[in-house]
Amino acid sequence: MGAVVTLDLPDDSPVLSQPWIVTFGPLEDDEAWEPVVCGPYERAHAISLAETVVADEELMAVVEPVNPYTTVDEIRAEIEQAKAAAAEAEDEDLEDDLDASYDEEDEQEVPEVAPSPPPTPEEVRAGFSRIASRLAAGV
């Protein structure tokens, strides 16, 4: 069984209505092949497809929103925010490493979750239409 990674967002997040992509790649670092990027999809379809594909294979699926930025300045601002967040997380990790001792017995077992039924091709195409309408409207 593989793994699905995605953002944990509140139910009212505007990001939920954006188009989403799924990047499938090897679960283990020792495998060498280029990741496969699929989408755009609506979020529920992206997660369902990802869960179904990784259910029986040792794959990693990253489900993430596509940010339809329209200017270079918007893209640069997002890059700067990502860099700042990474630097902050790195600082926190260093502090955690100094403050805590790691014990493998403390790890919690991650329960297996059965994938939801994948959307039909017709449902995915209808999702494409809804995404295209939102993008064209600037939403």
Image (cartoon, rainbow, N blue to C red):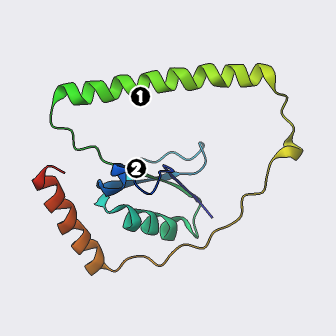
Given the image, on which type of amino acid does mark 1 rest? Ala
Label 2 Cα neighbours within 10 Å, binned few <14 / some 14-19 / many ≥20: many
**Toward the viewer: 57 or 120?**
120
Labelled disc at residue 64: 2
Residue 51 coordinates in the image, percent (x, y): 51, 66
Q: Which quadrant: the N terminus? A: bottom right
Residue 41 coordinates in the image, percent (x, y): 31, 62
Mark 1 or 2, nearer chain start: 2
Labelled disc at residue 82: 1
Labelled disc at residue 116: none
Determine the residue positioned at 58% across, 51% down: 27
Secondary element type, mark 2: strand
Vertical arrangement, residue 61 with respect to residue 68, above or below: below
Vertical arrangement, residue 98 with respect to residue 53, above or below: above
Label 1 Cα neighbours within 10 Å, binned few <14 / some 14-19 / many ≥20: few
Determine the residue positioned at 48% across, 68% down: 53
Residue 58 coordinates in the image, percent (x, y): 59, 60
Between the residue at mark 1 and the residue at mark 2, the CA separation in whole angstroms equals 14 Å
Residue 89 coordinates in the image, percent (x, y): 57, 26
Q: Is residue 82 left or right of residue 97?
A: left
Given the image, on which type of amino acid does mark 2 rest? Glu
Determine the residue positioned at 48% across, 49% down: 7
Q: Residue furthest front?
A: 12
